[in-house]
Image (cartoon, helix red, strand yellow):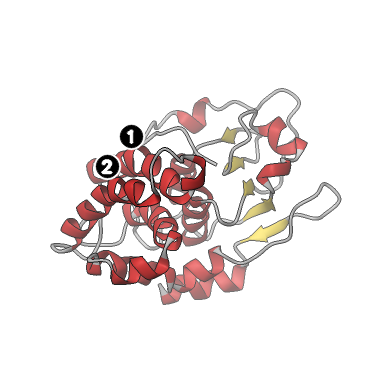
Protein backbone atom coordinates (compact mmCIF):
# COMPACT_ATOMS: atom_id res chain seq x y z
CA UNK A 1 0.00 0.00 0.00
CA UNK A 2 2.98 2.27 0.38
CA UNK A 3 4.16 4.83 -2.10
CA UNK A 4 7.70 5.88 -2.90
CA UNK A 5 8.48 9.03 -0.93
CA UNK A 6 8.26 12.10 -3.17
CA UNK A 7 7.78 15.06 -0.84
CA UNK A 8 9.30 17.65 -3.16
CA UNK A 9 7.32 18.46 -6.25
CA UNK A 10 8.58 17.31 -9.61
CA UNK A 11 6.72 19.62 -12.04
CA UNK A 12 7.67 17.43 -15.01
CA UNK A 13 6.34 14.17 -13.56
CA UNK A 14 3.04 14.02 -15.42
CA UNK A 15 4.49 15.58 -18.57
CA UNK A 16 7.19 12.88 -18.61
CA UNK A 17 4.70 10.09 -17.98
CA UNK A 18 4.12 8.93 -21.52
CA UNK A 19 1.26 6.55 -22.35
CA UNK A 20 2.40 2.96 -21.91
CA UNK A 21 2.40 0.70 -24.92
CA UNK A 22 -1.04 -0.67 -25.69
CA UNK A 23 -2.84 1.46 -23.09
CA UNK A 24 -6.37 2.35 -24.17
CA UNK A 25 -7.60 5.91 -23.88
CA UNK A 26 -10.14 6.51 -21.11
CA UNK A 27 -12.98 9.03 -20.97
CA UNK A 28 -12.11 10.31 -17.50
CA UNK A 29 -9.11 9.53 -15.28
CA UNK A 30 -9.27 6.08 -13.69
CA UNK A 31 -8.33 5.62 -10.03
CA UNK A 32 -7.37 2.28 -8.53
CA UNK A 33 -7.96 2.56 -4.79
CA UNK A 34 -8.43 0.65 -1.55
CA UNK A 35 -10.83 2.29 0.87
CA UNK A 36 -8.83 1.99 4.12
CA UNK A 37 -5.34 2.62 2.72
CA UNK A 38 -4.06 5.98 4.10
CA UNK A 39 -2.20 6.71 0.87
CA UNK A 40 -5.41 6.19 -1.10
CA UNK A 41 -7.45 8.22 1.41
CA UNK A 42 -5.28 11.29 0.98
CA UNK A 43 -5.39 10.99 -2.80
CA UNK A 44 -9.20 10.68 -2.75
CA UNK A 45 -9.44 13.68 -0.42
CA UNK A 46 -7.62 15.85 -2.92
CA UNK A 47 -9.62 14.57 -5.88
CA UNK A 48 -12.89 15.15 -4.01
CA UNK A 49 -11.85 18.63 -2.89
CA UNK A 50 -10.95 19.49 -6.48
CA UNK A 51 -14.32 18.17 -7.69
CA UNK A 52 -12.34 16.24 -10.28
CA UNK A 53 -14.34 13.20 -11.40
CA UNK A 54 -12.57 9.89 -11.79
CA UNK A 55 -13.68 6.35 -12.50
CA UNK A 56 -13.01 4.58 -9.22
CA UNK A 57 -11.99 0.94 -9.12
CA UNK A 58 -11.98 -0.43 -5.57
CA UNK A 59 -9.52 -3.31 -5.41
CA UNK A 60 -8.57 -5.98 -2.91
CA UNK A 61 -4.83 -5.91 -2.38
CA UNK A 62 -4.71 -9.64 -1.66
CA UNK A 63 -6.21 -10.30 -5.08
CA UNK A 64 -4.91 -7.51 -7.31
CA UNK A 65 -6.64 -7.35 -10.67
CA UNK A 66 -4.58 -7.81 -13.80
CA UNK A 67 -5.67 -4.36 -14.97
CA UNK A 68 -3.99 -2.73 -11.96
CA UNK A 69 -0.78 -4.69 -12.50
CA UNK A 70 -0.80 -3.75 -16.19
CA UNK A 71 -1.21 -0.07 -15.33
CA UNK A 72 1.40 -0.12 -12.56
CA UNK A 73 3.65 -3.18 -12.21
CA UNK A 74 4.40 -2.43 -8.55
CA UNK A 75 0.62 -2.75 -8.01
CA UNK A 76 0.27 -0.52 -4.96
CA UNK A 77 -2.55 1.97 -4.53
CA UNK A 78 -3.45 4.63 -5.37
CA UNK A 79 -2.79 4.58 -9.10
CA UNK A 80 -4.30 7.20 -11.42
CA UNK A 81 -4.53 6.52 -15.15
CA UNK A 82 -5.08 9.73 -17.12
CA UNK A 83 -7.13 10.11 -20.29
CA UNK A 84 -4.06 9.81 -22.52
CA UNK A 85 -2.90 6.64 -20.77
CA UNK A 86 -0.23 8.32 -18.64
CA UNK A 87 0.01 6.84 -15.15
CA UNK A 88 0.59 8.61 -11.82
CA UNK A 89 1.65 6.05 -9.22
CA UNK A 90 2.37 8.21 -6.15
CA UNK A 91 -0.28 9.51 -3.78
CA UNK A 92 1.47 12.87 -3.32
CA UNK A 93 1.63 13.47 -7.05
CA UNK A 94 -2.03 12.51 -7.46
CA UNK A 95 -2.86 15.10 -4.80
CA UNK A 96 -0.87 17.77 -6.56
CA UNK A 97 -2.31 16.82 -9.95
CA UNK A 98 -5.84 17.16 -8.52
CA UNK A 99 -5.18 20.66 -7.20
CA UNK A 100 -3.64 21.63 -10.53
CA UNK A 101 -7.06 20.91 -12.04
CA UNK A 102 -8.99 22.88 -9.43
CA UNK A 103 -8.26 24.15 -5.93
CA UNK A 104 -11.49 25.68 -4.56
CA UNK A 105 -10.46 25.15 -0.92
CA UNK A 106 -7.03 26.72 -1.47
CA UNK A 107 -5.20 23.67 -0.21
CA UNK A 108 -1.99 24.33 -2.17
CA UNK A 109 0.67 24.05 0.55
CA UNK A 110 3.88 25.80 1.46
CA UNK A 111 6.39 23.42 -0.12
CA UNK A 112 8.88 23.61 2.76
CA UNK A 113 6.24 22.64 5.33
CA UNK A 114 4.87 19.98 3.01
CA UNK A 115 8.30 18.44 2.47
CA UNK A 116 9.22 18.50 6.16
CA UNK A 117 6.06 16.93 7.55
CA UNK A 118 5.43 14.42 4.78
CA UNK A 119 9.03 13.23 4.84
CA UNK A 120 8.74 12.54 8.56
CA UNK A 121 5.29 10.99 8.28
CA UNK A 122 5.99 8.69 5.36
CA UNK A 123 9.43 7.82 6.68
CA UNK A 124 10.08 7.46 10.38
CA UNK A 125 6.46 7.55 11.55
CA UNK A 126 5.14 5.04 9.01
CA UNK A 127 8.01 2.70 9.91
CA UNK A 128 7.02 2.57 13.58
CA UNK A 129 3.30 2.78 12.87
CA UNK A 130 3.44 -0.45 10.88
CA UNK A 131 5.24 -2.21 13.73
CA UNK A 132 2.79 -0.85 16.30
CA UNK A 133 -0.24 -1.84 14.23
CA UNK A 134 1.13 -5.27 13.34
CA UNK A 135 3.11 -5.96 16.50
CA UNK A 136 2.45 -9.70 16.19
CA UNK A 137 4.64 -9.67 13.07
CA UNK A 138 7.49 -8.08 15.04
CA UNK A 139 7.55 -10.16 18.26
CA UNK A 140 11.05 -9.04 19.23
CA UNK A 141 9.42 -6.08 21.04
CA UNK A 142 6.09 -5.35 22.70
CA UNK A 143 3.56 -3.14 20.92
CA UNK A 144 4.14 -0.42 23.54
CA UNK A 145 7.76 -0.23 22.45
CA UNK A 146 6.76 0.56 18.87
CA UNK A 147 4.07 2.97 20.05
CA UNK A 148 6.59 4.90 22.11
CA UNK A 149 8.79 5.34 19.07
CA UNK A 150 5.86 6.37 16.87
CA UNK A 151 4.86 8.87 19.55
CA UNK A 152 7.94 10.96 18.80
CA UNK A 153 6.18 12.12 15.64
CA UNK A 154 2.88 12.62 17.47
CA UNK A 155 4.69 14.78 20.03
CA UNK A 156 5.99 16.95 17.19
CA UNK A 157 2.46 17.34 15.84
CA UNK A 158 1.18 18.27 19.27
CA UNK A 159 3.85 20.95 19.66
CA UNK A 160 3.07 22.42 16.26
CA UNK A 161 -0.68 22.42 16.91
CA UNK A 162 -0.19 24.32 20.15
CA UNK A 163 0.82 27.34 18.07
CA UNK A 164 -1.32 26.83 14.94
CA UNK A 165 -4.65 25.18 14.18
CA UNK A 166 -3.23 23.51 11.07
CA UNK A 167 -0.03 21.68 10.24
CA UNK A 168 0.78 23.80 7.21
CA UNK A 169 0.37 27.18 8.90
CA UNK A 170 -2.60 29.50 9.23
CA UNK A 171 -4.97 27.56 6.96
CA UNK A 172 -5.88 24.02 5.96
CA UNK A 173 -3.60 22.68 3.23
CA UNK A 174 -2.40 19.46 1.68
CA UNK A 175 -0.05 19.13 4.65
CA UNK A 176 -3.00 18.32 6.91
CA UNK A 177 -4.63 16.12 4.30
CA UNK A 178 -1.44 14.15 3.70
CA UNK A 179 -0.93 13.47 7.41
CA UNK A 180 -4.29 12.83 9.03
CA UNK A 181 -5.03 9.41 7.42
CA UNK A 182 -1.89 8.03 9.07
CA UNK A 183 -2.75 9.55 12.46
CA UNK A 184 -6.21 8.02 12.07
CA UNK A 185 -4.54 4.65 11.62
CA UNK A 186 -2.35 5.21 14.67
CA UNK A 187 -5.33 6.20 16.83
CA UNK A 188 -7.31 3.14 15.75
CA UNK A 189 -4.74 0.63 17.04
CA UNK A 190 -5.78 1.27 20.65
CA UNK A 191 -8.66 3.76 20.76
CA UNK A 192 -8.95 3.64 24.56
CA UNK A 193 -5.31 4.58 24.99
CA UNK A 194 -5.60 7.27 22.33
CA UNK A 195 -8.55 8.96 24.01
CA UNK A 196 -6.65 9.22 27.30
CA UNK A 197 -3.27 10.12 25.78
CA UNK A 198 -1.78 13.59 26.43
CA UNK A 199 -2.18 14.67 22.80
CA UNK A 200 -5.24 16.89 23.19
CA UNK A 201 -4.50 19.20 20.27
CA UNK A 202 -3.72 16.34 17.91
CA UNK A 203 -6.96 14.57 18.86
CA UNK A 204 -8.97 17.72 18.17
CA UNK A 205 -7.20 18.24 14.85
CA UNK A 206 -7.80 14.63 13.83
CA UNK A 207 -11.44 14.72 14.98
CA UNK A 208 -12.01 17.77 12.82
CA UNK A 209 -10.91 15.93 9.70
CA UNK A 210 -12.78 12.74 10.54
CA UNK A 211 -16.04 14.67 10.92
CA UNK A 212 -15.88 16.74 7.75
CA UNK A 213 -18.51 16.07 5.08
CA UNK A 214 -15.67 15.65 2.59
CA UNK A 215 -14.22 12.75 4.58
CA UNK A 216 -17.65 11.08 4.61
CA UNK A 217 -17.71 11.31 0.82
CA UNK A 218 -14.18 9.93 0.58
CA UNK A 219 -14.94 6.96 2.85
CA UNK A 220 -18.08 5.86 1.05
CA UNK A 221 -18.01 2.10 0.51
CA UNK A 222 -17.81 0.84 -3.05
CA UNK A 223 -18.09 -2.78 -4.15
CA UNK A 224 -14.93 -4.57 -5.13
CA UNK A 225 -14.30 -3.89 -8.81
CA UNK A 226 -14.23 -6.69 -11.35
CA UNK A 227 -13.82 -6.34 -15.13
CA UNK A 228 -17.49 -7.16 -15.65
CA UNK A 229 -18.62 -4.21 -13.54
CA UNK A 230 -19.10 -0.62 -14.66
CA UNK A 231 -16.73 1.87 -13.07
CA UNK A 232 -18.04 3.96 -10.18
CA UNK A 233 -17.84 7.73 -10.58
CA UNK A 234 -15.96 9.39 -7.74
CA UNK A 235 -16.82 11.72 -6.20
CA UNK A 236 -20.58 11.69 -6.79
CA UNK A 237 -21.34 15.14 -8.22
CA UNK A 238 -24.07 16.14 -5.73
CA UNK A 239 -22.28 14.77 -2.69
CA UNK A 240 -19.05 16.50 -3.64
CA UNK A 241 -20.57 19.96 -4.13
CA UNK A 242 -22.36 19.73 -0.80
CA UNK A 243 -19.20 18.54 0.96
CA UNK A 244 -17.08 21.37 -0.42
CA UNK A 245 -19.68 23.94 0.59
CA UNK A 246 -19.70 22.57 4.13
CA UNK A 247 -15.91 22.17 4.43
- Secondary structure under the numbered disc 1 in the rendered image: loop
Query: In the visual, does 178 lie left or right of 24?
Result: left
Residue occupying the far left of the picture: 163
Q: Which residue is drawn at 35% across and 66% down?
A: 193
**Residue 247, percent across and down?**
40, 72
Q: Residue at x 44, y 75 (%)?
A: 245
Q: How far apart are marks 2 and 1 (CA)?
A: 7 Å
Task: Say which label, 2 or 1, has the lower sequence index.
Answer: 1
Q: Give residue 209's mark.
A: none
Q: Which mark is residue 111?
A: 2
User: Going by the image, does 102 lie left or right of 170?
Assistant: right
Residue 246 vs 147, above or below: the answer is: below
Category of crowding for the residue at label 2, using alpha-carbon neighbours closer than 10 angstroms: few (below 14), some (14–19), many (at least 20): some
Q: In which quarter of the image is residue 116?
A: top left
Q: Which residue is farthest top? A: 21
Identify the element where label 2 is drawn: helix
| 83 relative to 48, above or below | above
Q: Answer with the quarter of the image where residue 11 lies.
A: top left
Q: Where is residue 235 in the image (x, y as percent from the top left)?
A: 59, 62
Q: Is residue 168 left or right of residue 71?
A: left
In the picture, the disc for residue 8 is 1
Left or right: 10 in relation to 80: left
- Percent position (x, y) of residue 218? 54, 63
Seen from the viewer's position, the closer of residues 75 and 100 is: 75
Q: Are marks 2 and 1 in contact (CB under 8 Å)?
A: yes
| Residue drawn at 49 percent across, 37 percent down | 3
Task: From the viewer's side, name the closer residue of 126 and 211.
Answer: 126
Which corner quadrant of the image does residue 130 belong to?
Answer: top left
The image position of residue 25, as x and y in percent, is 72, 37
Quadrant placement of the N terminus: top right
Amino acid sequence: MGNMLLPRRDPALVQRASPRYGRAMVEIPMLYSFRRCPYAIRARMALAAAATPVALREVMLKEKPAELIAASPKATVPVLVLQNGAVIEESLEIMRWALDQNDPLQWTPDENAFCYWVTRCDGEFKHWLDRYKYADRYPENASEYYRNLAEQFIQSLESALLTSSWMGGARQTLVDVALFPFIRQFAAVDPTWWQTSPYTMTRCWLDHWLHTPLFSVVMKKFPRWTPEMPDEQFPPATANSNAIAAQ
